[in-house]
Amino acid sequence: MKYELRKRLLASAVSLALLGASGMTMAAVNVQCPGDADGDATWNTPGETRPSPTTRCMHLVAGDGFAEMSDGHPMYTFGFSDRTGVPPQDVIAEGILGARWPGSTIVLDQGDELYLSLTNVGTVMRPDLFDPHTVHYHGFPNAAAVFDGVPEVSFAVNGGSTLTYYYNVAEPGTYFYHCHVEATEHMEMGMLAILYVHAQQDRTGIGGSVANPDKATQAPRFGGQGPLGYAYNDGDGTTAYDAEMPIQVSGFDSKFHDAHIQVQPLPFSTLETDYPQINGRGYPDTVIEATGGTMHPPRDTDGFLNGVPGDTTPLNNGEISQNVGSHISVNTGHKLLLRLSNVSIDRFFTLTIPGMKMRVVGTGAKQLRGIDGKNIYRDVASVNFGGGETKDVIVDTSSVARGTYFLTATEYYQMSNKTQLDGGLITEIVIN
């Protein structure tokens, strides 16, 4: 039934975007993935062959949807969602009203070759819009401007069409990705997502190489007995960690989002965050587990967003749009890597963990190391960073008592929503 509803919405709204003002526009979902014969960006069909273990394929869609704030306010959004494995002929019908907030997380290994296909499924709730979209891999040293996602120097993807980006993933660290078309509007509306790259040292170990890895210090996922991973190729183990968690801080201006769904002028000049969030949620929703159907699907609480007074149909056709939690659990004595990114349009944030010290080992996807090769890590009580910045922070729990601690903003007003009810920049760290 959900699939049929998507198809009806597609026929009534997305097709308008494909026709356009200048007449018929040809559009097609065309995924490029080496060794994939049926266009689903996977190698699970007989006869398909993955070219190498480092070849990665992924299929994202860009469209609209809804997110529900922790005080119950439904927020209209744009966003990305992962449709890898969906047959090309079903991608648009499956992807409409499927925006994630934040967008689907991308986790890569240094040395991967990523073929990232983006399909624009249109904005079903705003069929008057014809916005193209892109993927901009923020902070990535992209050798080819054509894949950078900035419209002035590369392509943008029109409604119903697909573009495949190619990335040679050369450097580790914490990044994020976003749409770079009409950037202020699209990023405020939610076209932001987590992206990070694991270091080559996870595979080689300290002092090893790909050909001759040091099993003692390889990450367990590569058969070694070392830590879970290393934030960077440090050569000395100083960025080793036993647990990791991406923490993306952001915020919505509720007036901006409400004006958008009501087809009203957008208040760019007065843009101001009143719903600060961690990984797309406010406390206590932040501590709900990260995956599965544990977050309730947003509901049409005011009865009008679906166009029928009193209608209580779940928004997003029942999909869970906010599927990235930030509840952290780590064993005492272990090191926790926090991959921090600030994607706010208008705000600096300062994060702290009362009772714990934090060590900043990287910023902007670069290890903090001087020109003389010495580490210049910083031990801090709080981390202040602005929109577009990323930080890699290690928390050593060896001298921390067991219990529950709070990762939180230092400014009180950022620990609640506009309504001063549930919400804000708070999540929990449990030391076992």
Image: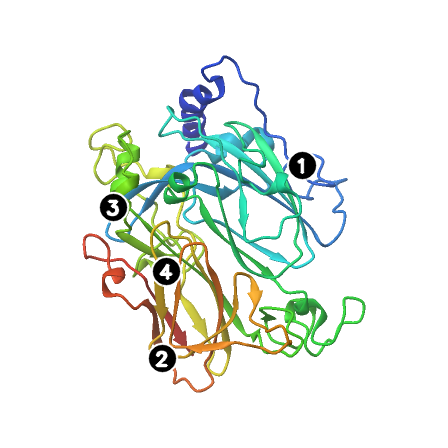
Q: Is residue 299 visible?
A: no
Name the kind of residue labelled 1 in the image.
Gln
Q: Is residue 361 above or below residue 184?
A: below
Q: From the image, tell me which residue sits under label 1.
A: 32
Looking at the image, is mark 2 or mark 4 earlier in the sequence?
4
Name the kind of residue labelled 3 in the image.
His
Q: Is residue 250 above or below residue 379?
A: above
Q: Which residue is at the far right?
A: 211
Q: Distance between the residues labelled 2 and 1?
A: 48 Å
Looking at the image, is mark 2 or mark 3 earlier in the sequence?
3
Q: In the image, what residue occupies the spot 61% across and 78% down? A: 374
Q: From the image, tell me which residue sits under label 2.
A: 403
**Residue 300: percent from the left, percent from the top?**
26, 38
User: In this rendering, which labeled residue sits more in front, label 4 or label 1?
Assistant: 1
Residue 379 relative to residue 227: left or right: left
Q: How far apart are marks 2 and 3 (CA)?
A: 32 Å
Mark 4 Cα shell of 10 Å, populated few (<14), some (14-19), many (≥20)? some
Quadrant containing the N terminus is top left
Name the kind of residue labelled 2 in the image.
Gly
Q: From the image, tell me which residue sits under label 3.
A: 73
Looking at the rendered structure, the number of numbered marks drawn on it comes to 4
Q: From the image, tell me which residue sits under label 4.
A: 288
Looking at the image, is mark 2 or mark 1 earlier in the sequence?
1
